[in-house]
Image (spheres, rainbow, N blue to C red):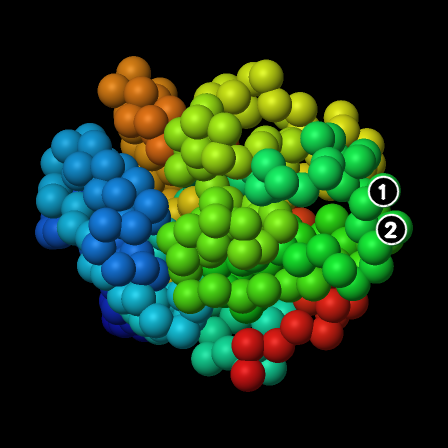
Amino acid sequence: MKSIICCSAFSCALASGPALVQAADTLSYPVKAVRVIAPSSPGSGVDIVSRLVAQKLGANLGQQVVVENRAGAGGNLGAEVAAKAAPDGYTLFMATPSHAINPALYRKLNYDSIRDFAPVGLVMTGQYVLVAHPSLPAKSVKELVALARARPGQLNYASAGNGNATHLAGELLKSLARIDIVHVAYKGSGPALVDLISGQVHFMFPNLVNSLPHIASGRLRALAVTGAKRATAAPHIPTLIEAGVPGYTVMSWYGLLAPAGTPQAVVGRLNSELVKVLRSPDVKERLAGQGADPAEGTPEEFSAFLKEEIAKWGKVVKAANISAE
């Protein structure tokens, strides 16, 4: 009878072995370098923020955190690599608004934006700004809407590319304000801004910070920012909601995701250290220089935010019949 009991206990120990090893690994995490996949080329906004966070996060974790650039396919390439990585906390993904837009924009993705990821935390939020060429006879959003209604199909707006957040910002205005405006897609925000400043197009929704010098010089006229509240970097510019478009909010944002199945203890540790990073004065100052605000929060809050973004942009993409393919 004793031998049976001993044998049973030995079997139980063997069965629990992998779980005990995983628990031990979790407690000692991290024991090697962590990589953050940035779905963009070096020097881009998401790359700059990823490297800032990686440097500070590495110091907190006691291990090097390196940024790996995986640009291509509107952010899908980097997301797919991250989704298929081992769920051990050593691969993270810096998600952008494209992560919420792409499920509706592409007919087929090799990953699921929700199912294949474990949210760690929102990193930052920023705003776009509705700017018009000074020659356009509209000095406010209300005047722009009135002008668009008086000239259906005659006003156009530039974007950084088809399906880009700057494109969908215009489509959301088109839908909520019930106006007929024409989209002009460019290969990046730089060429679009050049043509807007020269008067080749009427208005655009570029990044706020990149636009402030042109607004200050009078080469562009700022009509409204796209957030739910006024931007810290430009408190004198009203929001689109204040300017007469109820329900209008479009945010630029970055957030850290891990592959689905990453142990909750590891996700919790990463979130805790990320919050510490975002609370540090030098990080706040650096983000402010990018026109962004740190967005500390829990994994659950980031998960809810991401689901809301996917639902919102899914409706806009469907209503506008936009496709990246």
The residue under label 2 is which amino acid type? Answer: Arg
* Residue in the picture at 46% in, 80% down: 110
Quarter of the image for the N terminus: give it.
Answer: bottom left
Q: Amino acid at mark 1?
A: Ala
Count the marks: 2
Which label number is shown at residue 12? Answer: none
Q: Nearer the viewer, residue 239 or 144?
A: 144
Residue lying furthest front: 135
Q: Is residue 133 above or below residue 82?
A: above
Vertical comparison of 237 with 98: above or below: above
Whole-angstrom CA distance, mark 1 to mark 2, is: 5 Å
Q: Position of residue 153 (x, y in %)?
A: 78, 63
Left/right of residue 107 with respect to residue 62 in the rendered view: right
Q: Residue at x 66, y 73 (%)?
A: 322
Instruction: Look at the numbered disc 2 and give the secondary structure of its residue.
Output: helix
- For residue 255, what is the image quadrant? top left
Graded by Cα atoms within 10 Å as few (under 14), some (14 to 19) or many (20 or more), the crowding at tag 1 reads some
Quarter of the image for the C terminus: give it: bottom right
Describe residue 151's horizontal placement relative to residue 292 as left or right: right
Which residue position holds label 2? 149
Q: Quadrant of residue 290?
A: top left
Q: Which residue is mark 1?
A: 146
